[in-house]
Image: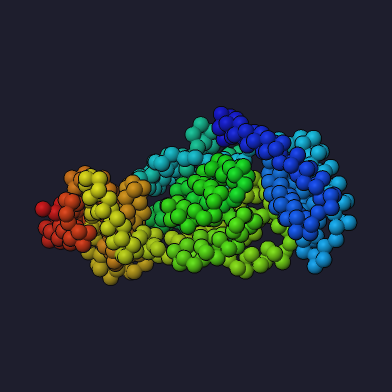
Amino acid sequence: MSDTVNAELQNQLQALNERFVERLRQELPELARTAGELQEPLPRERLRQLMLDIHEQLHRLAGSAGTFGFARLGEQARSLELHADRWLAAAKPGTQSLHGFARALQRFATDALAESPEQATAVPQTQQHRPDCLIYLLESDAQAGHDMGQTLGNFGYDVRLFTELAQLEAAAADDLPDALVIGLQHGGELAAVSELQQRLPAHLPLLVISDRADFDSLLTAVRAGAQGYFLRPLDITQLESSLERCLNRHLGAPFRVMIVDDDADLAARYSLVLRNSQMLVQTLQDPSLLLETMRFFNPEVLLLDVNMPHCSGPELAQMIRLNDEWLRVPIIYLSAETDITRQMEALLKAGDDFITKPISDNALIASVYSHAQRARSLSTALSRDSLTGLLKHADIKEQLALEVERAARSGKPTSVVMLDLDHFKRVNDTYGHAAGDNVIRALANLLRQRLRRIDSLGRYGGEEFVVVLPECSAEQARRIIEEIRSRFSAISFRAGVHTFNVSLSAGISETDGHAKPGVLLERADQALYAAKHNGRNQVRVAQ
């Protein structure tokens, strides 16, 4: 994290702490006055209402004070809250016991501001990377390294080749890559790479190429942080597929987190911490707006306060679970509630985890991140093709319909591309279905690397793909797909001792403001047929 960013975060945290202190200055004198009223003769209903109000206020303080640096205040509030809780839960609560409680409450309210808040610690910021995916490749065999770099370059990676480890370490000191690919010669490289990783602000994805696959070699690689392990002779497309998965996890779109808490200051604090860790955060204080906001924001994780006015967290969670579209969204309760029975009751109604306030910044990040990562993986598994990770047939058609509607509203063109692998049956028959699957994965990865985030990619069936390019004319799409065609035909595939190349053909159609999505697909398919009929390995635009 740069000094400027760190200073900015500290200033924001300090501003939130100061706002919390101001809130204490307003709330604590009121709490002291309420404590004084408890010592007067009161009707039982008035007494009970005062205790309910006190309990709610103490509950909020127990959950939030520690987060803003007032750990001792939070602990005292929790202790007093439990006393109020027992009194409210008693079948015949007495009034004499309230006098001692009232005096303790007054002392708490009077002395609370004397505590100095602990210095807020800036949370670690995740490493930010360039979109061009810089790869450092260590390979002592210069020719093999050059061939690997050339093939990875066809997939859109910027590869820098080093034949000596010292060269790579010197380069990393000046310019960090997005991933490391290390070719082992004697195994000692991994120890040096591990030391290098320890010096970095965040560990980089690491892929290892070796001549050995014994237990000790694999264990050493895992301990060095390897996320992929490949034997020589290297199948470069398998390495690229693993590299693409690692970078998708490392460079993927920010997780979307929604926080529902009636304590605006605490929600702002959580939001700041999570946003600083590269998450998109939406906060909400009014539970009645929950469903509307979820449709708009589409969260991947939901943080719910348990105790809120007019509506509890478990009640909100049950409402959410009535909608099948949100069954995949993890619900995490945030509460100062420490009673395990009540926590279990909340989780059994609806929910996936329970975090007890106060929670440290790092613990909050870790919990939210792990749930978000799991939720995204599950969502991807359900909506994406298992072989390629692209949208399935129905999903890409749905995305096409959305983009056609958007194009009609904006007046900007959208292009639809149908791609098909040439002589793919021959590949399966000659080299086997595993090699065929490798080719399909390679094309999917190449499309992802060379196209924009706003473009939609789908496996239409077998070896056929559909690409939807918003705000892109047919001629622009032709130039883009032509480059992809050229790069794909240059990729060498390996099957046993054999190497081979595969080409593709493509057809393109463009929106005209009138044609339906099905018509555009049909036009693109006809253009694809023309490309096949006229010799394959070419791109045609529908007339």
Type of colouring: rainbow
Which is nearer the eye, 396 or 186? 396
Give the residue at the far bottom of this rendering. 429
Residue found 53% across the figure and 41% down from its top: 127
Which residue occupies 45% across, 48% down? Answer: 253
* In the displayed structure image, the side of residue 37 where residue 505 appears, left or right: left
Between 322 and 516, the residue placed more toward the observer is 322
Q: Position of residue 54 (x, y in %)?
A: 74, 51
Q: Which residue: 58% across, 63% down?
A: 315
Total labels: the figure holds 0
Q: x, y (%) of residue 330? A: 54, 60
Q: Is residue 63 left or right of residue 453?
A: right
- In the rendered image, the quadrant that contains the N terminus is top right
Q: Position of residue 462 (x, y in %)?
A: 29, 67
Tell whether 12 sits left or right of 427.
right
> Can residue 167 be seen in the rendering of this structure?
no
Of residues 166 and 241, which is closer to you in this image? 241
Residue at x 52% of width, y 36% of height: 172
Q: Quadrant of residue 529?
A: bottom left
Q: Nearer the viewer, residue 279 or 504?
A: 279
User: Residue 61: x percent and y percent?
Assistant: 71, 47
Q: Is residue 413 visible?
A: yes
161 is higher (above) or lower (below) than 356: above
Res 11 → quadrant: top right
